Image: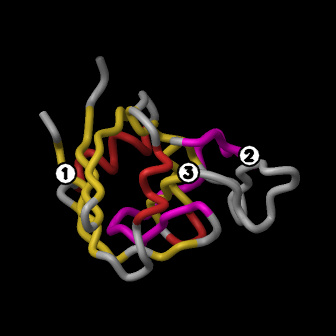
Amino acid sequence: MGKTIRITAGEVETTAELNDTRTAQAIWEALPITGRVSLWGDEVYFSIPVKLKLEAGKEVVNIGDLGYWPDGNAFCIFFGPTPVGQRNEIRPASPVTVFGKVIGDARIFKKVAARTKITIKNSQ
């Protein structure tokens, strides 16, 4: 199993598994990270202290994907359709690097309000 992280946002708590990208490694090394949630459709995002270039960018992602958005130095959690998606697709505002996936049902993030404190830490 790869590296796992714990994500806590208000009452919501879950784990996610990171993949083998350079982006995942850079985020892992920056942990713990704390921020304030912004929402964009069914996407949670927040700026993190990591500045990276796009790596194997994706224009459409899947529910539960973790993405790094270089335009905003942001950690993104996708849990449903986004405003620019067509027919319920999950389309980021611009391409992201997918660096991990939520373990379990990512739709739990529907319970998270804007400005909620979010913490990402090593779960191992």
Q: Is residue 54 above or below residue 100?
A: below
The kind of secondary structure element at disc 2 is loop
Q: Residue 121 shows which numbered tag?
A: 1
The amino acid sitting under disc 2 is: Val
Residue in front for this viewpoint, 54 or 119: 119
Residue in front for this viewpoint, 54 or 40: 40
Q: Which x, y percent locates residue 86? A: 87, 55
Residue farthest top in this picture: 1
Q: Quadrant of residue 93?
A: bottom right
Q: Residue 79 shows which numbered tag?
A: 3
The kind of secondary structure element at disc 1 is strand
Q: Is residue 89 above or below residue 117?
A: above
Q: CA distance from mark 3 to mark 2?
A: 13 Å
Q: Which x, y percent locates residue 1? A: 29, 17
Name which of mark 3 and mark 1 comes first in the sequence: 3
Circles 1 and 2: CB atoms closer than 8 Å: no
Name which of mark 1 and mark 2 comes first in the sequence: 2
The kind of secondary structure element at disc 3 is loop
Residue at point 42% right, 28% down? 20
Quadrant in which the C terminus is drawn:
top left
The amino acid sitting under disc 3 is: Phe
Label 1 Cα neighbours within 10 Å, binned few <14 / some 14-19 / many ≥20: some
Judging by the rendered image, the residue that carries numbered circle 2 is 60
Membership of 105 in magenta stretch? no
Q: CA distance from mark 3 to mark 1?
A: 20 Å
Q: Nearer the viewer, mark 3 or mark 2?
A: 3
The amino acid sitting under disc 1 is: Lys
Q: Which region is colored magenta?
A: 42-63
